[in-house]
Each structure stands twice: as C-alpha cells, then as structure tokens.
Amino acid sequence: MASAEDIKVGEINSYSGLPAFTEPYRKGWQLAVEEINAAGGINGKKLVVVSKDDSGKPADALTAANELVSNENVAMLTGTFLSNIGLAVSDFAKQKKVFFLAAEPLSDAVTWSKGNRYTFRLRPSNYMQAAMLVEAAAKLPAKRWATIAPNYEYGQSAVSVFKKLMSEKRPDIQWVEEQWPPQGKIDAGPVVQAVAAANPEAILNVEFGADLVKLVREGNTRGLFKDRTVVSFLTGEPEYLDPLKDETPEGWIVTGYPWYAIKTPEHDTFLKAYQTKYNDYPRLGSIVGYETVKAAAAILGKANSTDPEKMIAAAEGLSLPSPFGEITFRKIDHQSTLGAFVGKTALKDGKGVMVDSVYRKGSDYLPDNAEIEKMRPKE
C-alpha cells in the first residue's frame, strides 16, 4: 500500500497493444524503482509508480491520465509509446497543467510544433534519428528512393523529416514511390509489389513490430532487397530484430541497441543489474523504461516538490546519468540529449545482430536554437 508520505508517479503505456516493446519497458522501470527506493527514495520518500494500459488507443490513454491525476493524485505523468497517444497526453498535460515526461513517442511535434511547457521527452526524436541515418545514407550512390511507413503520426513525421534532411544533403535524388500501409495491418504483398515496380535504388523503411516481420518476409521472397540499400528506423532494436531470426536482411543501415557490443562502465552496471533481476537480456524498451523513471526521480528530487512549476524549473537544463552516458533535458525545447546507436544489420548464428555500431549523441543532431524557436509555439 502507498502511504501518504510516498511520491506517486503515473505511468501509461500500450502494454496489451505492443508487448514486444512495453514488457521490457515495464521491467526497466521496475528495476529503476527498486534501485531508487533502495538508495533512500526521493529525498527520503518512497517512489511508487501507478501504471495503466492504454491498449494503443488515445481515448483510453486520456481516461487513464484523468484517473491517475484525479483519483491517484500522481505528481506527474510518464510513458506512452505511439506518437498519436503521446500527443494526446501532452495536450491533456497542457490543459490540466500536469507535468508529463514522454518516454517513447518519437514525433517531432511532441517537443516542437505541438510542444508545451508541461511536456518533456526522453527518447531521440524522429529529426534526431533521421539526421543520424542521413549522415550514412547521403554517402550512398543511390539516387532513386522509395519509402514505406505506417500511415499515422509517427510514420508520417519520420518520412517527412528524412526526406527533408536527405534532399538538403543530396539535391540530386528523386523520391519515386511512397507506400503508407495502416499501422499494425500491413498487407505486405501489394506494398512490396508497388515498391518493386517503381524500381528504386534505395528504400527508407519505417515499419516496426509484426508489420516489419511481414514486410521482410515478403520482400525476401520477391527479391525486393536484393542489390538495394535499405535505411531503416528502429530495426536494430532487439525487440524488432530478434523476431526476424534467420530472415534478417543483411546490410540495412539502422538505428538500434546492440546491447552485446556496448563496452562502457555505465552500460555494464545496467546490464548486470538487469540480467541479475530478470535472467534475460535488455531490449531498447528496457533502457527507455529504466531511464524514464530515473529521470522522473531526478526531477522530483531536484524540485523537492510536486508543484508542476517547480518541477519544470528543475527539469529544464537538468543533467543526469544514463546507461548510454550523461544526458540533459534542454531548456529550449524540453528534449533530452539521449542518443542512439547507428550500425548495420547482419546475420550471426541464425540471428539478426547489429554490427559496426557507433553511438551518436543526441546533442549533435539537433537544429540550431533559432530554427527551434520558429517551430515551437510561444507560451
């Protein structure tokens, strides 16, 4: 039972909708809660996380947010996965003046065009990941490009920013085909056929989860990826790479999490603690869940208050450790500088792995402040 002295944090995610990511995510934040409380809690008070499932639906997420704020009296809201849900909860936070730490939604709108003073984000945004991928993709000889992405906020935002950054670096390229299958419901045959018919030299892929497995299977069967470079958001994350098993396409340029290849003291400490507790290896979701709750505790600890205005003041410019090294929540747009690993897919012992991976710091892949001020609404 939570006592009146405890500090409660509300957490919302698509547990039943996207278990491949959210199960490891839950394990990550549970490990963080355990570590925080073992070390004395937040200024001596115990941290309690009250978690709700949004079933992958914005309306359910808003119901959960309302219950957490009204009935549970949580100090802040955290979590969400899908970008449309993250934006819905961010808007709720703005209306109700509640602090919201978005964990996973990647749409640039979360911190820019629809950013607000109550919303902060942990993960590197679409812009940041696109900028990291474009750095590698712009060196490719390919001039004819096709795109495949889920038709909702995240996919649309990812394609739009990748095309923009890529065309700036390579004005000579042509975008010859776009495929927009519905999220979670890809009919991979016609998608692969349409892309193949456009005869691109390279493909940008934004599909993930079960849709990615179907796309890869169909693409392999029809030879879509043969002699073509594929650049792919998220595919190097174990939760999406592992299900591909021996069907993993080789040589895709991806962002992801090669947990087996990271040799830093911060990551070693996290890896050991996670493997000891769960007897399993971490996914990227594990890192996101862990660091979200660590960040929530650091913000509450520095504010020494559950007053939203004091928490905003504490969070702006706050630096804290993470398994990937130090990160900072920027004052200008409330985006954290957590980075991502960029590398290539390969097949090893019948399993997909990430090779040649390099960690890219988030702070190196953001537009300048003048650009951000143009995009972010004045409050």
Image: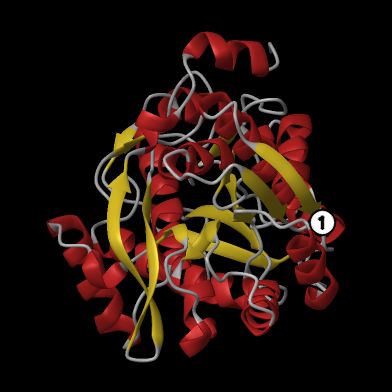
Q: What colour scheme does the image use?
A: secondary structure
- Quadrant including the C terminus: top right
User: Which residue is at the front of the view, 267 or 74?
Assistant: 267
Residue 117 coordinates in the image, percent (x, y): 62, 24
Q: Which residue is mark 1?
A: 180
User: Which residue is at the front of the view, 282 or 166?
Assistant: 166
Displayed quadrant of residue 226: bottom right
| Amino acid type of the residue that numbered disc 1 sits on in the rendered structure | Trp
Is residue 104 toward the left or the right of residue 89 in the image? left
Residue 102 coordinates in the image, percent (x, y): 58, 46
As drawn, which residue projects farthest toward the left? 265
Residue at position x 42%, y 31% from top? 365
User: Which residue is at the front of the view, 4 or 112?
Assistant: 112
Residue at position x 20%, y 74% from top? 272
Residue 174 coordinates in the image, percent (x, y): 68, 38
Depicted 247 relative to depicted 253: above or below:
below
Q: Is residue 75 visible?
A: no
Residue at position x 65%, y 71% from top? 224
Displayed quadrant of residue 110: top right
Q: How many marks?
A: 1
Q: Secondary structure at mark 1?
A: loop
Is residue 94 toward the left or the right of residue 282 in the image? right
Is residue 241 toward the left or the right of residue 162 in the image? left
Residue at position x 61%, y 80% from top? 220
Is residue 283 toward the left or the right of residue 269 in the image? right
Depicted 158 relative to depicted 227: above or below:
above
Depicted 130 relative to depicted 184: above or below:
above
User: Which residue is at the front of the view, 239 or 24?
Assistant: 239
Residue 201 coordinates in the image, percent (x, y): 60, 53
**Label 1: few (<14), some or many (≥20) within 10 Å?**
some
Q: Is residue 347 visible?
A: yes
